[in-house]
Image (cartoon, helix red, strand yellow):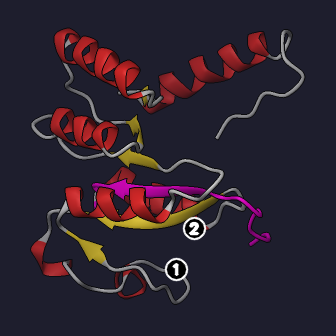
Amino acid sequence: MSEKSKNPIPVLVSGALGKMGKEVVYSVTNSPDCELVGVVDLNDENNGKNISEVFDVPNSNLFFSNDLEASLCTVSQNSRESKEKPVMVDFTHPNSVYENTRAAIAYGVSPVIGTTGLTSSQINDLTIFSQKAFVGGAIIPNFSVGMILLQQAASVAAKFYDNVELI
């Protein structure tokens, strides 16, 4: 594992016990540019457990929560002085992704959505809400296709900028 960046991006994972959520947790904990700052899942059995009891990660001071809004509030408050703004990666369920995303934007946490099921109307509403709140985000309901498109966009953007970074 490489040394952590001086200003890692704070990342909260919502839906952390799902197949993709677990992968995000492992990716973030092994990334030098990111710092896992919150782990949320509705599974009551793990609520309050240290993530090291559930995931194969080094000893951690992070505990599972089943309260997304409380976690978003904590992450938002803890990163007020940080150069890097917090991100919420959501791999939950179509029934909750819209409200989860609105809550993240309301707390100033940039959502990265991997959950499918948002309607065009919901996406439009989230776009308007995020613009008013000055909070960026990404909706990538199919990460494999989405990542390919993001890589293509970055290669095009690289022609116009000195630095382009994909995280």
Against 70, residue 144 (above or below) is: above
Q: Where does label 1 land, which residue?
A: 57
The residue depicted at 31 percent of the width and 56 percent of the height is: 72
Q: Where does label 2 land, which residue?
A: 29
* Region in magenta: 1-17
Amino acid residing under circle 2: Thr
Against 38, residue 133 (above or below) is: above
State how many labels appear.
Answer: 2
Q: Nearer the viewer, residue 101 or 119?
A: 101
Q: Specify which label sits upstream in the sequence, 2 or 1.
A: 2
Residue 41's spot in the image, x, y percent?
A: 22, 63
Would you call the spot at circle 1 few (<14 residues within 10 Å), some (14-19), or many (20 or more)? few
Q: Is residue 156 visible?
A: yes
Q: Are marks 2 and 1 in contact (CB under 8 Å)?
A: yes
Residue 149's spot in the image, x, y percent?
A: 58, 17
The residue depicted at 15 percent of the width and 63 percent of the height is: 42
The residue depicted at 23 percent of the width and 46 percent of the height is: 92
Amino acid residing under circle 1: Val
